[in-house]
Image: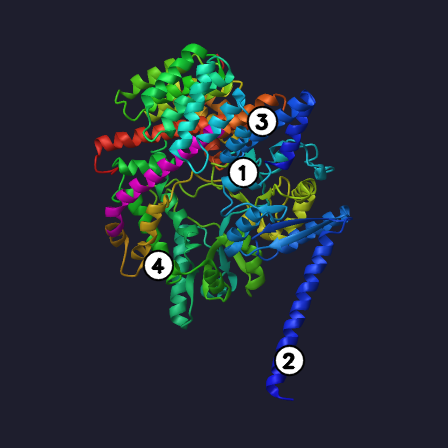
Amino acid sequence: MPVFTRSVAVALCGLTAGPAAGAAGAETVAAWEEGAQLSFADAARHFARLGDSREARFGRAVMLVNAQPKTLANVAEGRALFLALRRERADDEPGIGALYYLARIAQFHEARPDLAAARTSFATLVAEHGDHFYGQLARFKLATLALYDAADTRPPAERLAAAEALGEPLHHPGIKRDFHLLAAEAHLRFHLSVEHALRHFLAAESGRAPVRDVVRAALFLQIGECARELGRHGLARRFYERFLAEFPRDARGATVRARLAGLPREVAP
Amino acid sequence: MNPGRLLRGCALGLLVGCFGFGAFRLLHRHQREHDPNRVTVRFAHWQLEAGVAEGFDRIARDYERRHPHVRIEQLRIPERVFAQWATTQLIGGTAPDLIELGFNIDTLLKARHFEPISRFIDAPNPYNAGTPLAGQPWRNTFVDGLDSGFDEKLGDYYGIPSFFATIRVYCNRNLLREITGGEQLPGSYDELLALCEKTRAFAARTGRALVPIAASRDNAPYLLDELFAAQSQKLVHAFSPLRKLLPSQDGFFSGYLAGEWNFDTPAIRSGLTLMREVGQYLQPGFLQLRREDAMFHFCQGKALLVAAGSWEATGLRTQARFPLGVFRLPVPGPDHPRYGTHTWGRPAESGGRTAESGGRRTTGPFGLYQGSKHPDVALDFLRFLSSQRAHQAFIDRSGWLPVVVGVEPPESMRDFAPDPEGALGGLSLRWGAEILRITENNWHLLFAPHGGVEAFVAEVAPRYREAMAADMRRRDRRSFQQLMLGDSSLEAVRQLAARQPDDPGQQFKLEALLQTQNERDVYYYYMNHRLADIARTNPETTR
């Protein structure tokens, strides 16, 4: 665990609780820190030493499924811990989280992925805890599966309509942003609707969630390009100019300047 | 005295002398490191090019003058052993305080042995006080906004870059004058070809061992890939529907499996023809040679041109006994009679931000070792190293391109500055490990005097599909693995962020990881869907 981070964690826990609780809290933070630094086996062992609390068991299960060496026994133990957490209580943080990770185990960690089981768990999360972080994330994962499940042979427009219906009620800023990017790019990948793609790109851009530089630069261009194709020159101009202002050294600048020069001036009505 | 005994005595004396000297050095270093009044910070890198050590040394001594209780030690590790050396030091717990990231220092090693620096980069760099960068967040003082220091898988910043790089063609001006009677560097593709032809004729006429272009397997791609990529511009952008104005590698290469392009596609033929045309002027046997061989050949005056990075400039100026000319590789433009159809012309060069737009040209990032005994001092030295004044001093000494905003490259490096004017980039044929293997094993067919495009295609095309499918499967496994691991680390960061709701660093990391993980989900399922779709319509393609 990074020395700086550990000191900060210990200090935070010590300040916000009594000495005993502070020490236990610091150890929990230390275990999560190990997980954040990809030391999953260490984190799983660390959580095991922290006793029988729900958070400790939840943390251990989350880390076990990725602990190296990866074994089916570890995955099975992780699944058993999640199931036990659900049985004891299904509506607190570890209980709700456990259902999300049971779905992810079915999706990725079993010897044979079971997408039907994953979908069922995600759907339960959406129905019972739709506003919770995991419920929101489950909605996004369901939308992704609706769109890109390799076994689904429905026409792209049908799959995209299903994904959009799933994603529209999202309100977590970061997950909503990612859903709009998913939908916009699907419209373009399947050559469905540039107009709808633009609507989604604009929604992703105007949301409250921060966007990484690389994604923001692309987003400005995607909006500019879609708007230009649709003849919305004022909008295209605005986003091309934002791109040039924010990313002046980007190699696409010359092309964007040429695009700008080629846009007809919109005359005010 | 018996000569045998004398010799043995001398050998023993020498051995004792060496041992004594070694012991003294070790003791001296030990004393220095354990001097209670002095802190030693060590930094390691593999940049052995001329001028770099002097540049770093100058910064180190400046820092020591400001902080007399600190001693800065520079460790120069040869490139060939750096990966093994760094891994051993990190695992053994004996690594220096700052290490140049790269080679095999991957995400896992970074996560376990390096300190994330995200929480420091939004504060101003105090060493920029009194400069136009005063008060600016540290991250914004770099031309790439510190993109190059960010690790997407960990959602954290780990490195502070130290230089910028471009690729240029170097020219021996003395030879140029001898061959052409003038000083004019080639400004177009046809002028480049004409110059190469003149060089060849000059060599034949004078009997001198001279080739137009020195090359090796390391630096020939600087020329050949760029030529091919320019010919692929229009084609690859047709496989990039997302309108990011970037070529999509996955879209383009999966398009091959879908039968949407092949080796008969005119742009591909044209790119290969262009590569062969220029390949004829490269040093014979270049596919077997390494970088040093090509540079040596050029420095000996046995080649008129060589393509190399800006980082070689100072070394070449020191070693070559002739004046150097420098120019960007001219590629055929859209008005070229033979190659104009498929190209938009020479691509623009990225000047930094963003990472996707033209490759990561900011490089040489230093990471902070978690086990550092003096992390605060090491970090402070990193701030000093990347401050505007210190970086200017480093650039002046090393002759490299600057990575800090407002730092001017030396006059001699003006021609190396990134050229922002130009078209969107294309792609070369280099991709996954299998494709790389079958193309690299057969390049000789393209460049051999009796070979050519047909010979190369006849050998590569039948095996390309299988290689592509293997590479796709490998990518699929890798993205699957990253997806699995991403869940556990995202959960950990989410738990930490919930405990520190007011820490912008933790919140940023959570957002970055959430976005990355959602992108991975989408990418994984999209690629699987695309490949399943291809398999349905072309069953033989994705075996």
Element assignment for label 1: helix
Task: Tell me the chain of label 3.
Answer: A
Among numbered discs 2 and 4, the one appearing first in the sequence: 2
Residue B275 shows in this picture: yes
Secondary structure at badge 2 equals helix
Residue position marked by numbered label 4 in the rendering:
B280
Residue under the image location 44 percent in, 16 percent down? A86
> Which residue in the structure is indicated by mark 1?
B111
Amino acid on which the number 3 mark rests in the picture? Thr
Q: What residue type is labelled 4?
A: Gln
Mark 2: few, some, or many residues within 10 Å (few <14, many ≥20)?
few
Q: Name the residue under label 2.
A: B9
Residue B34 location (% of width, % of height): 73, 51
- Which numbered disc, 4 or 3, marks the residue closer to the eye? 3
Give residue B442's quadrant in the image: bottom left
Do the numbered discs 1 and 2 sit on residues whose CB atoms are within 8 Å?
A: no
Q: Distance between the residues labelled 3 and 2?
A: 66 Å
